[in-house]
Image (tube, coloured by chain):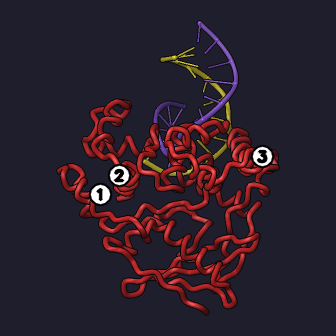
Chain colours: A red, B purple, C yellow
Amino acid sequence: MPLLSLQTPQSFDFDQCLFFLDRGYDECLYQLSGRSVLRTIECDGVLVPFSIIEKKGNLVIEVDEGITDEVQNLVLDYVKEWFDLERDLAPFYSLLNKSDQLKPLAENYHGLRLIGIPSLFEALCWSVLGQQINLTFAFKLKRRLVEAYGESIVFKGHKLYHFPSPKALVNLDEEYLKTQQFSRGKVKYIKNVAESFLKDGLSKSTLLKIPEFGERQMLLTNIKGIGVWSANYALMKTLHQPEAIPFGDTGLTQSLFNFGLIPDRKDEAAIIKFFKEMRGWEAYTVFYLWRSLAG
DNA sequence: GTCCAGGTCATCG
DNA sequence: CGATGACATGGA
């Protein structure tokens, strides 16, 4: 099978990234096999599967025979975004190293990239699924949604599911999903997200055309079911937007409190003050703080 | 049994 | 406006 290759940047540690990908949750959108990761992208309605493994300073990506150069480039772009390969982390580490409390993050998780969700639709739906419930349950719901409404393809002996399209989710069967332990709120919110893509022309590219962060955020929070947490989560995971801090996140406040960075878990002013010191690297800091919760 | 999870909205006063 | 309850479930 054809092999593509991406040179890994400075401060990149594939095993740190694998640890994040394999935190022990029931993930359904990619699979791990040894030290390789398998998943799919979608091009013109067709699923394109691929695998990634690290070899001697390169990420080696395997695709099926007969994939056009154009589609190969889409796979490469996806991997670059997913692993945030084009970012220079040196300024982030020098910022962390200025603080005695944060220094361990730079040491312990060196080379960890902000693992993204390149699809805006997937990120918004995932933020809805993850609202308020524990992550174990959220992953369970995601699997049920994806297996009921998403397509799959077999690649190297693995059945790989792809996240459903807005069209596939706009007419969700609420009664069926009730039997699958979805709240009516979540079903409605996911429908709302799908509708804003289909009817209001929301997309990653329309979002990118808006220069101002607050306006981007508002475009998302205008959707019923997407609050500040969800909007910023999506902006962080899809656009790697530095200033997208998922305010209200329980894990984030927990972690800030654990590190002695805020005096009280409800002290939002202290959280804002803390992130002022991290300007330009807020989202990365959040990602590393979350990482610290996993041990 | 109680409390809280990678929140949000509707409905109060 | 700010406060409060519902939502669904499972693990500590």
Task: Identify the residue under disc 1.
Answer: A92
Q: Which residue lies at the image location 61% right of the left edge and 60% below the top edge?
A: A119
In-front residue for pair A292/A56: A56
Q: Which residue lies at the image location 22% right of the left edge and 58% below the top edge?
A: A94
Of pointers 2 and 1, the one earlier in the residue sequence: 1
For mark 1, name the chain. A
Is mark 3 in CB contact (under 8 Å) with mark 1?
no
Of pointers 2 and 3, the one earlier in the residue sequence: 3
Numbered tag placed on residue A281 in the rendering:
2
Find the residue positioned furthest to the bottom.
A1
A260 above or below A64?
above
- B9 vs A266, left or right, is right
For mark 2, name the chain. A
**Which x, y percent locates residue A10?**
32, 73
- A107 vs A111, left or right, is left
2 and 1 marks on the same chain: yes
Element under disc 3 = loop
For mark 3, name the chain. A
Residue type (three-letter) at the residue carrying disc 3 = Lys
3 and 1 marks on the same chain: yes
The span from disc 2 to disc 3 (Cα, nearest Å) is 34 Å
Quadrant of the rendering where the C terminus of chain A is positioned: bottom left
A21 above or below A263?
below
Quadrant of the rendering where the N terminus of chain A is positioned: bottom right
